[in-house]
Image: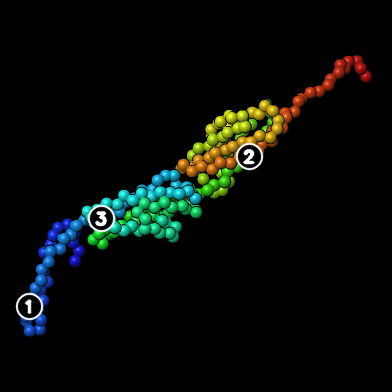
Amino acid sequence: HIYTNTSTYGTQLLITNNDGCRDSSQVNVVIRELPVSDFNAVLPFCQDLAITFNNNASGPGTITNYLWNMGDGSTTTLSDPTHNYSSGGDKNISLIVTDDWSCLDTLEKSIYIVPEFTLGIDYFGLCTNTPAAITGVVIDPPMTIDTWEWLFHDGTALSGQEVIYSYVQSGDYNLQLTAEKNGCQEIYTEVLSVAPSPTADFIYGFISLDDR
């Protein structure tokens, strides 16, 4: 029998044997609410970064057991676990809670783990005193970046996927690019070689129209 409401129910068992003799027994069955499984995970959700899961389960009794399925084949019975994911993508997390009456409830949520990503810098023709367009790119895996931050050798900080910058002197310079996706950061540094700008010049002489 399935009880649909909480209450105390008088339950009677009546038996009759082959001789027609009868006996009965009655007990009170107390039905209470099920526990409620609930949890949240603390941002950011990044590959190879410890993620904290907070158990928020509740119920009329005492929660005695927790069983987490972390969505990558691993499980834990801790009430508030931390977990590292070695790969990115969607992870289906479930929490089964059991109370002191052996009643249980299950909740499943999906979270997206940002995978580690590789950055690069695109540019063309770095010459002194010439504005150059410098662009940040995601090499692998493809994704849309939330923010791009640049730090040049002289302390100049610029924002945006593409920035314009002029080098005053020729030489080799470090350029740092920081990209962020859902709170997960990757930092990439490249040495850029800046060439001196060429100097245009020419020599001319006077020529008479009468010269033959």
Residue at the spot of label 2: 190
Circle nearer the N terminus (3, 1): 1
Quarter of the N terminus within the rendering: bottom left
136 or 65: nearer the viewer: 65
* Residue at the extreme bottom of the image, as rendered: 19
Q: Is residue 140 in view?
A: yes
Is any atom of residue 142 visible in this view? Answer: no
- Residue designated by label 1: 22
Q: Quadrant of residue 31?
A: bottom left
Answer with left or right where residue 116 lies relative to residue 26.
right
Instruction: Tell me the kind of residue under disc 1.
Output: Arg
Q: Quick one: label 2 or label 3, which is nearer the N terminus?
A: 3
x then y, percent, for residue 74: 43, 59
Task: Looking at the image, tell me whether mark 1 or mark 2 is earlier in sequence order.
Answer: 1
Identify the residue under disc 3: 62
Q: Identify the image quadrant of residue 64.
A: bottom left
> Which percent across, then down, holds residue 77?
36, 58
Please give left or right for residue 112 compared with residue 96 in the image: right
State the quadrant of the C terminus: top right
Q: Amino acid at mark 3?
A: Thr
Q: How far apart are the alpha carbons under marks 1 and 2?
A: 92 Å
Above-or-below relation of 52 to 8 = above
Residue 144 appears left or right of 19: right
Amino acid type at mark 2: Glu
